[in-house]
Amino acid sequence: MSIRRRLIDALLMGLTYLCITLAIGALLLLIGYILVRGIPHIKPSLFALKYTSDNVSLAPALVSTVMMTGLSLLVAVPLGVFSAIYLVEYAKRGNKIVSAVRITAETLSGIPSIVYGLFGMLFFVSFLGFGFSLLAGALTLSMMVLPLVMRSTEEALKSVPETYREGSFGLGAGKLRTVFRIALPSAMPGILAGVILAVGRIVGETAALIYTAGTVAQIPQSPMQSARTLSVHMYALSSEGFHTDEAYATAVVLLLVVIGINTLSASAAKRIARR
């Protein structure tokens, strides 16, 4: 019997290492392909501040990506974090409203991005009259990442030991002080992990932004102007078929932006965890 168990354990361990190897190999293959195809075509003219038909600069799209990400997080993170605080710290256990909110959040997480784009076009662009603008795209993306931020914050708050809260109450602290001085700082690494995932989805989104933010290749002077992000810029170049090399170069820049944001967020999470 022990030999059989050892064989099963060895088989499962081998399958585990095989899956890890395939996952890492696929990731490295994808990154290597992008770098090989894109790096030779990166040139200073791609970072010019003005987009022209002769020079399909990615600088306006890069600036628009940063603005789109910041504006989307500005809306989604406070709503998601405070909603999770209410669900975990203040709502009564077994509350039907809480169950309905959690089911709704999980359902919204599985909706395709193009459905969000169509809703954003009908509601923000047409009904509210925002037009194809940075604001319409950011509000649409904030709806997409709101369930992700809320659920990750909720799980992070649940992972905080109850002894922390009991100790705070025992020292005379109130509910609000306990939440914001004890529970929330302890859950901050998990919250930042959710924000990192949200940033990745915002930066890589294309379908929803085509219907809401538009594809104008310029640096927006206000939130009511149209703009294109790096992912939309890459899609536009590749779909036209005239600037495929520049599309691969844009993919390299997009990859570096995502890696840079994830690295900075991870280092910030580690510093907060140490404190």
Image (cartoon, grey):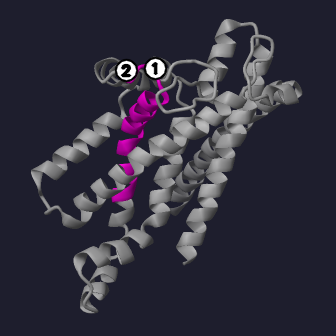
Neighbor class of circle 2 (other Cα within 10 Å; few <14, some 14-19, many 20+) is: many
Residue 33 seen in the current view? no
- Identity of the residue drawn at 26% across and 74% down: 176
**Which circle's residue, 1 or 2, is located before the other in the chain?**
2
Left or right of 94 on screen, residue 162? right
Q: Nearer the viewer, residue 17 or 215?
A: 215
Q: Can you name the residue that lies furthest to the bottom here?
A: 171
Can you give x and y, in whole percent of width and height, for residue 170 in the image?
25, 91
**Chief SS of the magenta region:** helix
Q: What stretch is highlighted in magenta?
A: 130-154
User: Is residue 135 inside the magenta stretch?
Assistant: yes
Amino acid type assigned to the residue bearing label 1 in the image: Phe
Q: Residue at x 68, y 46 (%)?
A: 259
Q: What residue is shown at x 48% (from left), y 33% (from top)?
A: 223
Marks 1 & 2, CB-CB < 8 Å contact: yes
Picture coordinates of residue 79 (x, y %)? 33, 50
Say what secondary structure mark 1 lies in: loop
Within the image, what quadrant is residue 47 found in?
Answer: top right
The C terminus appears in which quarter of the rendering? bottom right
**Circle 2 SS class:** helix
Identify the amino acid type marked 2.
Val
Left or right: 228 in relation to 102:
right
The crowding category of the residue bearing disc 1, from other C-alpha atoms within 10 Å (few below 14, some 14 to 19, many at least 20), is many
Disc 2 designates what residue?
125
Compared with 11, 241 (above or below) is: above
In the figure, residue 267 lies in which quadrant?
A: bottom right
Residue holding disc 1: 132
Residue 173 is left or right of residue 266, and the answer is left
Query: Is residue 257 rendered magenta in the image?
Result: no
Question: Quick one: which residue is furthest to the front in this view?
Answer: 221
